[in-house]
Amino acid sequence: MSNMFHRKIIFPQKDHAFYHVPSIVVAPDGSILAFSEERWRSPCDDTGQCHIVMRKSMDGGKTWGKMIHLRQKEGAKYHMGSAVTDPVSQTVLLMCGGGWLKSADNGNTWQDWNLRVYDAKGCKGVSTHGSAPGIIKRYGEHRGRILWPARTIVSKDGYDDRSITDRREKCYSMVLYSDDSGNTIHASNYFLKGTGEACLAERINGDLYLNARAYWDDGKRYTAISTDGGAKFLETGGDDTLREISQGCNASMVRYPPQLCDGRDILLFANPDTNGANREHGVVHLSEDGGGTWPIKKEISPWGDWFDYSTMTVTQDGVILVMYKTTPSMQGIASSPDECCSMALARFDLKWIGLQHPLE
């Protein structure tokens, strides 16, 4: 595998269209589906109108088909959730506002995804807001289980999502899971007070590792582990290696397929690697012990270039894709929310990160 790195804008910001909350997934046929919110006339969370859009690539993210709207209605706000491909039903499942969707033909057409969700006791509603995809459990017990990182609010009494104090006091991370291809979904316990927009990955020993955005100001991501397939998570504290910007930022994480790296337990994690005021300096970290340590890191975007919400996947031939929110030129610091609402895609390989590919 060559030492390869490319970047390009795939959702360009337009006059009235501002792109936020990316999600990316590999369809059963190997094509790449990239999703985003299209916030109409305003880039802010409280925009009056928000659509769900998608583009498809048939060549591993090199080129992209036209953008299509999956959810669009005047005056309606449809926000992004989580995407995942179920290998059993060969179906792409998409959690999003306006009713969840599914595709049985690699994203060419979409139908309503009708299901039943069983909330955990004490929760006031669960959402998969954020960019992290669902995962499929492949080791140990509960193989084939679909799991999604999620956030819950323990009390909606007076809750204001724009209030960092409310997020710190009332928001918790949790995980949703399904053993029947998404027909019924159950919820784990809730944990890690003051967190949300988490990433999830499975270690080779079958444990589940969760890494969450933290709404605190201590510069740390917060983590938890499940040893029972996702029904219960135990808090493992803050990570001193992965820096978290004040009040946190959505990040991305993915397992590199072991069959493509001689069975190594490799996780990849990307976020704005800074404790400063700006979402800049996008970095991908590499762990060879399932997230225990992160000894290798490489810049995706340098200091002084905006790197916001991100999502990550690996193509069937081992190319790593990071889709992230940035400025239209992929350069410079945004001075206002309407200056950083394009979606870029970075394509690279393990050798570029700094790990010699073991199968060369």
Image: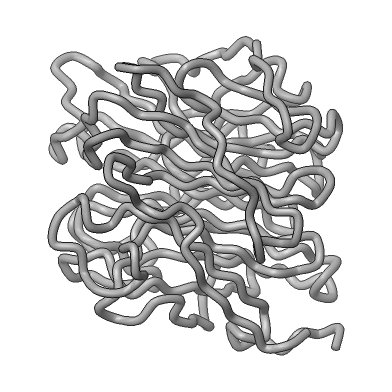
Q: Residue at x 21, y 30 (%)?
A: 46
Q: Is residue 56 left or right of residue 322?
A: right
Q: Is residue 237 among what the camera can see?
A: no
Q: Residue at x 71, y 49 (%)?
A: 26
**Residue 341: x percent and y percent?**
32, 52
Which of the pair 32/303 is nearer the observer?
Answer: 32
Picture quadrant where residue 326 is located: bottom left
Which image quadrant: the C terminus? Answer: bottom right
**Residue 6: x percent and y percent?**
57, 77
Picture quadrant where residue 359 is located: bottom right
Q: Is residue 297 among what the camera can see?
A: yes
- Image position of 122 with respect to 132: above or below: above
**Residue 177: x percent and y percent?**
64, 29
Which image quadrant: the N terminus? Answer: bottom right
Which of the pair 163/234 is nearer the observer?
Answer: 163
- Image position of 33 with respect to 249: above or below: above
Count up the numbered dots: 0
Q: How was this image coloured?
A: one colour
